[in-house]
Image (cartoon, rainbow, N blue to C red):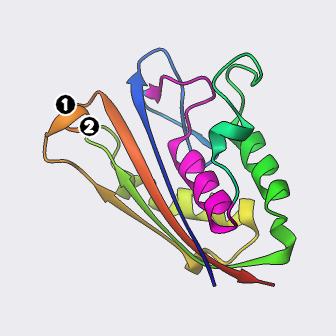
Amino acid sequence: MLVGIGFDIHEHSENSELYLAGLKLEGVGFKAHSDGDIILHALCDALLGSVGKKDIGYYFPSNSKTPENISSLKILEKVLSVIEYPSLKINNIDIIFISQVINVSKIRDKIIENLANLLDINSSKINIKGKTTDNLGIIGNQSASSCQVIISLTNA
């Protein structure tokens, strides 16, 4: 069995569109070199970690080598290639989305459905939980949101 953990945090920006799990949604987006999709970024790091590869920043540095505003869908596509995804089988994905700004319960089903489609897996293998920080810290003061992902895979 292979296990990987991923984490991402981004500052909110009124000037950015909101992307989560590959979906463009209504709401305040994130300040980032890419589209700021913290769910896909954390998922990509978890996938990379599960097979002992370097982090997402190695493949997509936040500089001129990576196109500005790159879609996280392109990042996921590259990561799936790097980890040789067809040779793996996802057992489950557990996501913790931490925000005082975005209520994940309202978009949970959309996120799960889209991730299942992107990864070509049954949606029952994906769980997402929404948490707040009870108004503590950078997340609590609504300046940022974060995401943590743990994934379990086996060789196909």
Residue span colored magenta: 29-52
Image: 61 above or below 64: below
Q: Secondary structure at mark 1?
A: loop
Which of the 4 image quadrants contains residue 144?
top left
Residue at image coords 14%, 40%: 136
Q: Position of residue 129 (x, y in %)?
A: 37, 64
Question: Three-letter amino acid code at disc 1?
Answer: Asn
Residue position marked by numbered label 1 in the rendering: 141
Helix, strand or loop under label 2: helix
**The N terminus, quarter of image:** bottom right
Query: Is 45 one of the magenta-colored residues?
Result: yes
Residue 73: mark in rendering: none
Which residue is at the front of the view, 152 or 97?
A: 152
Q: Residue 104's x, y, as percent? A: 38, 53
Quadrant (top left/top right/bottom left/bottom right) for the C terminus: bottom right
Structural distance between the alpha carbons of marks 2 and 1: 6 Å
Q: Is residue 32 left or right of residue 77?
A: left
Left or right: 142 with respect to 71?
left
The residue that mark 2 highlights is 139
Which residue is rendered at x = 31% and y = 44% of the image?
Answer: 99
The residue carrying pointer 2 sits among few (fewer than 14), some (14 to 19) or many (20 or more) residues within 10 Å by Cα, namely: many
Q: Are marks 2 and 1 in contact (CB under 8 Å)?
A: yes
